[in-house]
Amino acid sequence: MIEPCTFTIIGATGNLARNKLLPALYHLELAKRLPEQMFIIGFARSEHSDDSYRSEVAEMLQGKVRGELDDKTLQRFLARLHYQQGDLHESENFAKLHDRVTEAPLPQNRIFYLAIRPAEFGVVTNHLAAVGLHKEQGGWSRVVIEKPFGYDLESAHILEQQLHRHFREEQLYRIDHYLGKGTVQNVLVFRFANLMMEPLWNRNYIDHVQITHAESNGIEKRAEYYDGAGAMRDMLQSHLLQMLTLVAMEPPARMDAESLRDEKVKVLKSIRTITPNAVHAQAFRAQYKAGMLDGEKVAGYLDEQGVTPNSTTETFAALKLYIDNWRWRNVPFYIRTGKRMAKNTSMICIRFKHPPQQLFRETQVEQIKPNWLLMGIQPDECLRAELQVKVPGLEMKTETTTFDASYCGVGQRKLDAYEALLLDVIEGDSSLFLRYDEVQWAWRVVDPIIKVWSTERDYIHTYPAGSWGPASSNRLFDREDQYWRNSIDRDEE
Ligand code: BG6
């Protein structure tokens, strides 16, 4: 049930609020999904009155929403907005925030979205608790935090202790916006609402799984954060491992939050530990150097503003993982991510084994291609299978055809992942948010690698901006007939 609430954005003038949260809330307003009694309070350091904040939001929404801004919706949305000025580090500002959010007629169900630097999560939750905003008297109180949850296993643990000093697990919504993406959710529907797939979904039929997230963007203006994080912490430990859990998990007992998260944790726990001497065989990192993108020259990572000279931070990371359970034993999962790659694309590609007997081998020169199941996450949401069929004619020749099992880009109404997830927080559904043990087990997977990498500071592979990353990352593959798939379209493969 959707209840009235007061939604406070801490860090209300920052990038996340501007680019994601406010546009997502506006779209929920447009879809008439926000509770009628809902107030949005922006909290940030800059000086603003309610009115000047409203004008700023109206301006920032321009160009960030789908289609034209709808005036009636915009007015309704702006009327919900209020502003409270304050520095995060000064406790008296939280006393003022307390007075603001507890004022009648603001609903006593409260959400605090921490759209701030992770290093400030602890300070802010302490301040919130000091003025009693963690208490659930007369309504609920929820805190939403963004990744990265810590910097490694140990710091994640420390952060967790800080959060749990004041908040119960049920009050914490650890967001991984990949779980709000349409195709990522479709993985569950495709697997568990179709009987056909289940018998094939295991080591007997699947050769390997690939998960790719490639971006043509560089690090933009985020050197301060990114240079200390790198691709492994920024994308792989969180978004990519989450996608892997959905592909690999067992059917949950029920579709509730705990049953779903129990199964995801089981997958993470079953990932074979990468020992320090296996790091080179199972992990690969690289950094972009200058190159060409869309016909334009772009700078290398070391020349980006704010990057430390000689930094060995990776902007490309790839891993080979094995899940040691009955379903997946010895099936490699190859996952990779990179900035300044040739194209923006995220996809899950599942390659099936060859049929046990190559019956058509004599009839054509080429060996029959294996089946692939392809899930496009972005830019287009898509679900597609590649199958072999006979070419019409007298010869017994085969060719690959694709079978689109979803709209595959046709007339898609693109939702942003934040829309679905913000609505879930308002509705109190934590299924698509991470429980702490998921975060912890995901750190256990990558911790040995980041430890080894942190001791190897003299050398890092490079790749030209605008490429698909270094060819040497192919060394991760178990066999010669395995290769990175760069597109879900056969022609571009
Ligand atoms: C964020 C990372 O979590 O995800 C960014 O910090 C990355 O570096 C972004 O660009 C990718 O998200 P999306 O939704 O644009 O694929």
Image (tube, grey):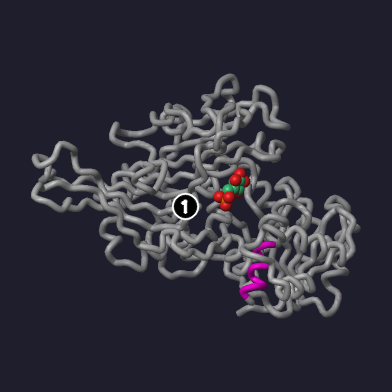
- Tell me if residue 168 can be seen: yes
Q: Secondary structure at mark 1?
A: helix
Can you say which quadrant of the picture contains the C terminus?
Answer: top left
In this picture, residue 440 sits left or right of residue 125: left
Residue shown at the point (57%, 60%) measured from the top left: 417
Q: Position of residue 185 (x, y in %)?
A: 47, 62
**Residue position marked by numbered label 1 in the rendering:** 243
Q: Position of residue 386 (x, y in %)?
A: 29, 52
Q: Residues within 10 Å of mark 1 (few under 14, many from 20)?
A: many
Of 466 and 305, nearer the camera is 466
Kind of residue indicated by mark 1:
Met
Magenta extent = 23-31
Does residue 53 sit above or below 2 in this rendering?
above
Q: Quadrant of residue 251?
A: bottom left
Q: Quadrant of residue 225?
A: top right
Q: Position of residue 207 (x, y in %)?
A: 29, 44
- Tell me if residue 136 can be seen: no
Residue 25 drawn in magenta: yes
In this picture, residue 260 sits left or right of residue 55: left
Of 191 and 472, nearer the camera is 472
Of 21 and 172, nearer the camera is 21
